[in-house]
Image: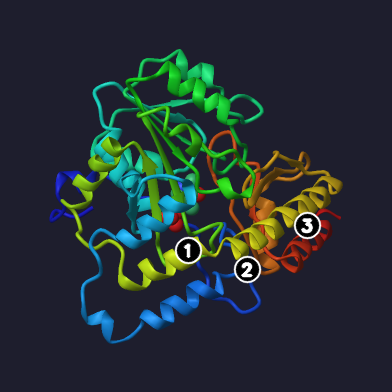
Amino acid sequence: MSRFWSDAVQGLSPYVPGEQPKLPDLVKLNTNENPYGPSPRAIAAIAAENGDNLKLYPDPNSDRLKGAIARLHALEPAQVFVGNGSDEVLAHAFLALLKHDAPLLFPDISYSFYPVYCKLYGIAAETVPLADDFSIRVDDYLARPCGAIILANPNAPTGRALPRAEIARLLRAKPDAVVVIDEAYIDFGGESAIPLIAEFPNLLVIHTLSKSRSLAGLRVGFAMGHRELIDGLERVKNSFNSYPLDRLAIVGAEAAIDDTAYFDATRQRVIASRERLTGKLEALGFEVLPSSANFIFARHPGRDGAELAAALRERSIIVRHFRLPRIDQFLRISIGTDAQCNRLAEALAEILK
Ligand SMILES: *Cc1c(COP(=O)(O)O)cnc(C)c1O
């Protein structure tokens, strides 16, 4: 606290991201990064842009990148919004579309940035408990009055996916509420809501290049929806920062989006490793929630979650543990290379002995 801070700042509870320690020989499975690195075409595009051009401002509207995203998903460029990571896109969506008199609904266990944005923008919010198996029950949302809804699908940190038909049922029943679907992990196995955009003007779908495109360091995310929703986001963006994407981010993201062969090959490798690691952890007695993401969420019936995370850390393996109600026995483990997954499984076998 400081007497120099505004009242608004005194009341904030900032998000704490997973740590980025710089230790040698670390197996870093705590922030859902992709172990395979970005497309070589993205790296080449960034290298080619990295020169005298940087004296000039970037395109404030990132039109070429929006064009590439629109082509990929069979949308109009006017149905695409881009930002400095999907965290920034989410922040603008909270202010532009999710702040109403009636409360914003989201699950009690979900991306922990959502309540942070609510504090920042003074948004009335209500959490809806997940079912005992940690799935989202659409009926619980239908039963409550609300101003808007945001769901991560697959959900974080559970990894569980909601079928597209369930999202359609929600959109149909709540035609006057904006429904944001945060699809940060959708490329690892869930059903995207993008095909519903044409039918539902209240749907906004948000993607990131940080996970499936392995560009967490470039900071690019985007939203897709009816142009009325996109225009609302553009109004906030143009009241905040004209150039959220720099020149390197624009060209790198465009090349990564266009390189569908590399994208498919690397995400399939992650999915295959996830299934192998799930089997290994189940053999060690873990309960592993069914994951459609690039991480798994697992607990051991006989061993404390915090204790397991600490024992892994002693072996230079970092996973994420949340000291939060309902999930404090779980470990969230990002899917690394097979070699990293093996080291994790071997360490857990040793710890459990
Ligand atoms: C990682 C993540 C994001 C943020 O991604 P960035 O584009 O890196 O800001 C958003 N939502 C969820 C659910 C995430 O897990």
Numbered label attached to residue 335: none
Query: In the image, what residue occupies the spot 70% across and 53% down?
Result: 271
Q: Position of residue 279 (x, y in %)?
A: 82, 48
Amino acid at circle 1: Ala
Image quadrant where one finds the C terminus: bottom right
Query: Is 347 situated above or below 201?
Result: below
Ligand 1 closer than 8 Å to label 3 CB: no
Amino acid at circle 3: Leu
319 relative position to 255: left or right: right
Q: CA distance from mark 2 to mark 3?
A: 24 Å
Task: Inspect this view and state whether residue 16 appears.
Answer: no
Neighbour tally class for label 3: few under 14, some 14-19, many 20 plus, Cα within 10 Å:
some
Numbered label attached to residue 216: 1
Q: Position of residue 103 (x, y in %)?
A: 32, 24
Ligand 1 closer than 8 Å to label 2 CB: no
Amino acid at circle 2: Tyr
Q: Residue furthest top?
A: 143
| Disc on the earlier residue, 1 or 2 | 2
Q: Closer to the camera: disc 2 or disc 3?
A: 2
Q: Secondary structure at mark 1?
A: loop
Q: Which residue is mark 3?
A: 348
Q: Secondary structure at mark 3?
A: helix
Task: Inspect this view and state whether residue 248 appears.
Answer: yes
Q: CA distance from mark 1 to mark 2?
A: 12 Å
Q: Which residue is mark 2?
A: 36
Q: Position of residue 260 (x, y in %)?
A: 57, 60
Q: Secondary structure at mark 2?
A: loop
Ligand 1 closer than 8 Å to label 1 CB: yes
